[in-house]
Amino acid sequence: WDAAEKGTDLEVYLEEFLTSISQQSGLQIRPGEVSGSRNGDHEMVVQTFGAVTEGISLRGVLGTWFCEQSGRIFVVNYAVDAQQAPQDLMAAFERHLDSLACH
């Protein structure tokens, strides 16, 4: 999580997050689709991505939302082997989200 103010552009936040991950880890990241969703009572921005490092290919998804009660932006990242089906990735991501609470 990160402290933030209401109105922060979540798509820009995700773009900066992916850039930071790439710079810090050396991953070659290919941003994918951006879509809207919900996590509980929060609007959430979801972005898929592909990543490659040292010959290992990953398929991943990021979800981010702003929680007014806590005043924080949450970013959830889930990645698997790129050979895993996209629908399996999204199902696992949803189960992961179900285990988290921001307030």
Image (cartoon, rainbow, N blue to C red):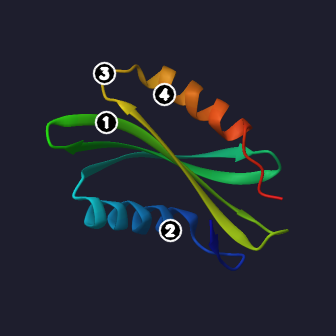
Give above or below for 73 relative to 85.
Answer: below
Residue shown at the point (72%, 38%) measured from the top left = 99
Q: Farthest left residue? A: 55
Residues marked 1 and 2 touching at CB (< 8 Å) = no
Residue type pointed to by label 3: Gln
- Label located before the other in sequence (1 or 3): 1
Judging by the rendered image, the residue that carries numbered circle 4 is 89
Q: Is residue 78 left or right of residue 99?
A: left
Q: Farthest bottom residue? A: 5
Location of residue 32 by image quarter: top left
For the C terminus, which image quadrant? bottom right
Give above or below for 19 relative to 5.
Answer: above
- Label located before the other in sequence (1 or 4): 1
Tag shown at residue 83: 3
Judging by the rendered image, the residue that carries numbered circle 1 is 58
- Label located before the other in sequence (1 or 2): 2
Q: Is residue 13 left or right of residue 25?
A: right
